[in-house]
Image: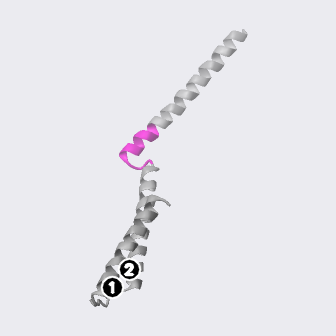
Amino acid sequence: MSTKKQWVTQLTGLLMAIYSLLMTLNLHFDWLTVESINAVVTVIVAAVVFGGTLYAVFKNTFLFKNGKRQAELIEKGKIYEAEKKELQDTKIGEDDK
């Protein structure tokens, strides 16, 4: 089981334990039901998934300062590799003469 699923399971268990404790003590809240606990857990899971997706999109784009620098370095690396290959091709051509 992944860490995220374990956290969700822990949260669900905690909320259900609180719900059971309050029911045992005969304390009733109209808003605290099994359905509301499930809804809270669903919202938390959706927020975690949204955050993970947002982070992945942020890290894998070249729109921000660090990303632009990385894109430039990648492009320079491609140019360097192309120049290196061109130089090797030139050396091979000179050796043939």
Please give the residue where the numbered disc 2 appears in the rendered image: 37
Along the line of sight, which residue is nearer the eye, 90 or 65?
Answer: 65
Where residue 41 appears, as percent x and y from the top left, is 40, 74
Decide whether residue 64 is among the magenta residues: yes
Q: Which residues are magenta?
A: 62-72
- Vertical placement of 52 versus 85: above or below? below
Q: Residue 31: x, y in percent?
A: 32, 87
Q: Is residue 21 left or right of residue 80?
A: left
Pick whichever, 73 or 31, lies toward us.
31
> Residue placed at 51% from the left, 32% from the top?
77
Q: In the image, what residue occupies the spot 28% across and 90% down?
A: 26
Q: In the rendered image of this protein, does residue 70 appear above or below residue 23?
A: above
Which of the 4 image quarters holds residue 45? Answer: bottom left
Above or below, 90 relative to 63: above
Tell me if mark 2 has few (under 14), some (14-19) or many (20+) residues whose alpha carbon lies within 10 angstroms of its own: some
Q: Position of residue 56 (x, y in %)?
A: 45, 54
Tell me if label 2 and label 1 are in contact, CB under 8 Å. Answer: yes
Of the pair 21 and 94, the residue shown nearer to us: 21
Answer with the quarter of the image where residue 9 lies.
Answer: bottom left
Give the label on residue 32, or none: 1
Label 2 secondary element: helix
Q: Amino acid at mark 2?
A: Ile
Work out whether mark 2 precedes mark 1 in sequence or the reverse, and give the earlier one. Answer: 1
Q: Residue at x 45, y 37 (%)?
A: 72
